[in-house]
Image: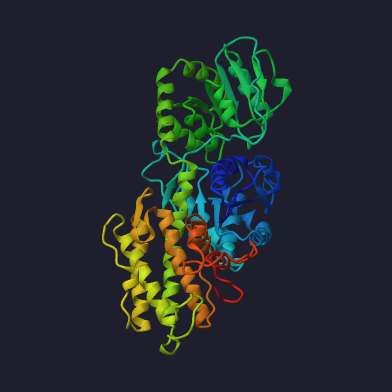
Amino acid sequence: MRILFSSVPAYGHLLALLPLARAAVRAGHEVALLTHPSMGAAAPSLTLLAAGPSQAETLDGTAAEVLDPIEFFVERRIRPGAADAVTAARRFGPDLVVADHVDYLGQYAAAVLGVPWAAHGSTLPLVEPLAAVFAERAGASFRELGVEPARPVAYLDPWPDSLLRSTDSYPADRIPVRPEPHTGDGPAWLPPRFDADRPLVLVSLGTVVDDPALLRTVVAQIAAYDVNVLVAPQAAGDLDSDRVRTAGFVPMRDLLAVSDLVVSAGGAGTVLSTLGAGLPSVLLPLGLDKPVNAERAAATGAAYVVSGPDQIGPAVDKLLRDDAARAAAQTVAAGIAAMPSPADALESLLRRAFVPAAAAVLESVADLVAGTTDDQAALATPCDGMDVGALQRHLLGWLAMFGAAFADPTGPQRPDPAAYPAGQTPREAAAEVRRIARTVATALTDAQEDQDISLPALGGTYPLQAAVGLLLAEALGHGWDLAVATGRQWRPDPMAAEQALAVARTVVQPAYRGEGMPFGAEVAIDSAAPALDRLVAFLGRDPGSGRR
């Protein structure tokens, strides 16, 4: 499957997205990143698709902490970057887009291409009425460009329950995903040496705040106490002394591993990474969402919030001796560790995305069945030994079996696919497919993530995702057979075909192919061919000739 991740060109947003993108790569998906080229160094292993202005171009001389967020994320980005985003995305051909929740270029490309998209929350969910204003302004920009915005299929949320409130709301079903500090792809970082062993305080004001005078004041405040100070991502050598070192842009995981306490501006990524490491922090919130992040962290007991740099030194000194704060940070860390991993969250996302896809495929099959006429029943099909009438009975028999399996995943009773009765009119058969579609959609919506599906007719029990793929392979493969036999064009959801193909590759063994077997020999086909063509070619049909 091709998954396009998209982010605004800001490290706090992009780095939060990368663990999910890397999980997708490890799972065998083809992945690309849509953002400005200036972000390429943060993810050198991903294919970068260039679109939109850089952060500096978007700011255009305005300080980030005072710029209106709607102007930054919506007004200054959508129109300048829309055309390039669509061109790049169309060339990649995504089956799914995962966009930072305030990256509207990825969302716009998904709407133009007609593919599902999911939001990824690099920050806490937008509060009302700000969320409504964002949606209104972005929607207006989309419509001016000739496309209607689409709702996300899910919202991936890295914030643990301990930092959420009952008033937080989401634009789609929430999928929790464990936040992970940035790891980087380069060589291992070697921590600097200090002249003596003291508590180490990490100072990280983030990648947005650029105020050298403020940074010097903060460092001086902390260095007045008996601690070592490590400063990142800045690399200004004039700050270095016996007890102060600058690290430059080092992966946060490495920095946290050697730190005892963190001083930050309250950026979402730093707050989550610090808490995930079980470390307490002193927070000087500097604009945008940072005051809310700081308030949430402080409410757990794991952070002190200060209103000015002159308060940081005493706060650090007190927090280093506050065992309760450290214990609170470790409690939050345990909750974060228990959240679903990026790999598990990705699996949940794909299942959510396929609920409408599976139902849409079955509805499309129902349309094919309904459009079959009595005089076509004896027509030959790409399936050896089956005319259209026999093919439809075969297809409905297997769909009925799948419908019963999803309705009762562990039950012993399954209808025999080969015993589906003859004599239905096309209209009656189509109504039965639509009933099965509703059953499957309801079952998938309600299913547990680790649900197994018993399919005795296919030799055993399958994980939920695999069972969905088998259902789609059956519906798409024989739907294609029916469309070819009756001379009709058929264009089902390509994302569903990708899922079916991925599962079929793991299930269809060489022993199942050949004379008298369910599948013919795999047909060679261009890897860039449409997903449905690649699926039927794998199943043993020739997309060019329509034969097996």
Is 342 located above or below residue 317 in the figure? below
Q: Residue furthest top?
A: 196
Instruction: Report the number of discs.
Output: 0
Is 444 located above or below residue 240 in the figure? below
The residue lying at 29 percent from left, 54 percent from top is 410
The residue lying at 69 percent from left, 15 percent from top is 241
The residue lying at 33 percent from left, 82 percent from top is 424
Is 86 located above or below residue 364 in the figure? above
Q: Residue furthest front?
A: 515
What is the x, y in percent for residue 443? 34, 59
Please identify the quadrant where the C terminus is shown: bottom right
Left or right, 521 with respect to 232, comes to left
What is the x, y in percent for residue 202? 58, 23
Please identify the quadrant where the N terminus is shown: bottom right
Choose between 164 and 191: the one closer to the eye.
191
Left or right, 104 with respect to 399, comes to right
Residue 437 visible in the picture: yes
Residue 172 visible in the picture: no
Q: Quadrant of residue 422?
A: bottom left
What is the x, y in percent for residue 52? 67, 53
Left or right, 356 with respect to 79, comes to left
Choose between 538 and 195: the one closer to the eye.
538
